Image: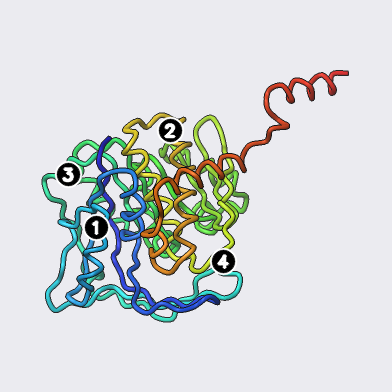
């Protein structure tokens, strides 16, 4: 088993959905990613918060075994705060306010021990900062990166450099169309592969994910949940589960990358069942495995297993 490093935002979110409201709940890409990864490996968090960040929140991270030595606390500063809401379909987040606060001047500085961590998730931060982190990492084995439409529109050149230096690229369907200017996601995914990443994951929310590798394309459905409360952080939880699982295996072959995506999808199905990552902290022993097994069974087509395929071929040939 190896270690994982996650660099991203740590925030306080005010969120309202048709199922309730959470005031100044723990959020941010780094938070969600680290909690998910902590189920599989030792994980270190790099981020920044203000003096108003709750002490009990830090304890929640520590209780999950997360190394918070890279989390800067700015004296007198205020933590990044996002306020938004979801309407009934909960497919799109609507922003009320975004207060960057201490996150606006965040410059990740890795410690000597953090520079040697081989599994890295660059969550959604400015591409220039992602490049700076990559320059500080000594010998990465696997780099997973995420981004957003804002950077595609205003920092595309820098973002492209990050993509070229990453192994796994995460984008949602709208971001793929914006970046590649291809309306067809198959074309867009293949276009992104040409830039250098080994794997491109196109996130489609409740409709799962399209995964592109050099020699194949795989569709992963999302686990169908009947208690959807808050979709915030699902993508970051997916990425955290993926990088944490890969660090646990410490083997980045194609087959294991596929398994990592499966685990990422499984972890994302938990986080949406509660506000913030409250549901993630309530996962019982064996629950991740049971849900991963269920998702695996949902993806199987017994009628298309080898013997059945041979029957189909014989029928077609006849």
- Between circles 3 and 2, the one closer to the viewer is 2
Q: How is the image coloured?
A: rainbow
Cα–Cα span, label 4 and label 2: 30 Å
Side of 27 where 221 appears, left or right: right
Cα–Cα span, label 1 and label 4: 32 Å
Determine the residue positioned at 11% across, 45% down: 112
Q: Are marks 3 and 4 in contact (CB under 8 Å)?
A: no
> Is disc 2 surrounded by few (<14), some (14 to 19) or many (20+) residues within 10 Å?
some
Q: Circle 1 sits in a helix, a strand or a loop, which is it?
A: helix
Cα–Cα span, label 3 and label 2: 24 Å
Q: Are marks 3 and 2 in contact (CB under 8 Å)?
A: no
> Is disc 4 surrounded by few (<14), some (14 to 19) or many (20+) residues within 10 Å?
few
Q: Nearer the viewer, residue 168 or 29?
A: 29
Count of number-bearing discs: 4
Whichever of labels 4 and 2 marks the residue nearer the N terminus, that label is 4
- Between circles 1 and 4, the one closer to the viewer is 1
Whichever of labels 3 and 2 marks the residue nearer the N terminus, that label is 3
Q: Circle 4 sits in a helix, a strand or a loop, which is it?
A: loop
Where in the figure is residue 167, as x and y percent of width and height? 37, 39
Q: Nearer the viewer, residue 261 or 66?
A: 66
Q: Which mark is residue 256?
A: 2
Q: Circle 3 sits in a helix, a strand or a loop, which is it?
A: helix
Q: Which mark is residue 63?
A: 1
Determine the residue positioned at 45% across, 62% down: 149
Whichever of labels 1 and 3 marks the residue nearer the N terminus, that label is 1
- Between circles 1 and 2, the one closer to the viewer is 1
Q: Circle 2 sits in a helix, a strand or a loop, which is it?
A: helix
Q: Which residue is mark 3?
A: 115
Q: Which residue is mark 4?
A: 91
């Amino acid at each position: 088993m190896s270690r994982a490093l996650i660099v991203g935002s740590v925030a306080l979110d005010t969120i309202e959905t048709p199922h309730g409201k959470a005031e100044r709940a723990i959020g941010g890409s780094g938070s969600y990613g680290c909690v998910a990864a902590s189920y599989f490996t030792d994980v270190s968090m790099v981020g920044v918060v203000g003096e108003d960040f709750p002490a009990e929140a830090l304890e929640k991270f520590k209780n999950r075994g997360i190394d918070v030595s890279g989390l800067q606390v700015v004296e007198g500063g205020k933590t990044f705060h996002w306020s938004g809401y979801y309407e009934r379909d909960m497919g799109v987040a609507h922003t009320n306010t975004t207060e960057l606060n201490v996150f606006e001047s965040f410059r990740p500085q890795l410690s000597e021990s953090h520079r040697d961590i081989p599994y890295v998730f660059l969550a959604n931060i400015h591409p220039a900062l992602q490049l700076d982190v990559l320059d500080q990492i000594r010998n990465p084995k696997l780099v997973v990166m995420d981004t957003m439409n804002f950077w595609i529109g205003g920092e595309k050149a820098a973002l492209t450099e990050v993509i070229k230096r990453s192994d796994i690229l995460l984008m949602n369907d709208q971001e793929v169309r914006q970046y590649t200017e291809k309306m067809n996601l198959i074309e867009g995914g293949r276009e992104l592969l040409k830039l250098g990443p080994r794997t491109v994951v196109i996130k489609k929310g409740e409709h799962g994910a399209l995964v592109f590798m050099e020699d194949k394309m795989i569709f992963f459905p999302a686990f169908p949940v009947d208690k959807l409360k808050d979709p915030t952080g699902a993508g970051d939880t997916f990425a955290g589960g993926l990088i944490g699982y890969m660090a646990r295996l410490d083997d980045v072959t194609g087959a294991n990358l596929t398994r990592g995506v499966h685990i990422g999808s499984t972890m994302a199905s938990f986080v949406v069942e509660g506000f913030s990552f409250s549901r993630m902290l309530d996962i019982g022993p064996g629950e991740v495995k049971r849900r991963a097994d269920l998702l695996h069974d949902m993806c199987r087509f017994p009628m298309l297993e080898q013997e059945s395929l041979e029957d189909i071929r014989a029928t077609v040939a006849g």
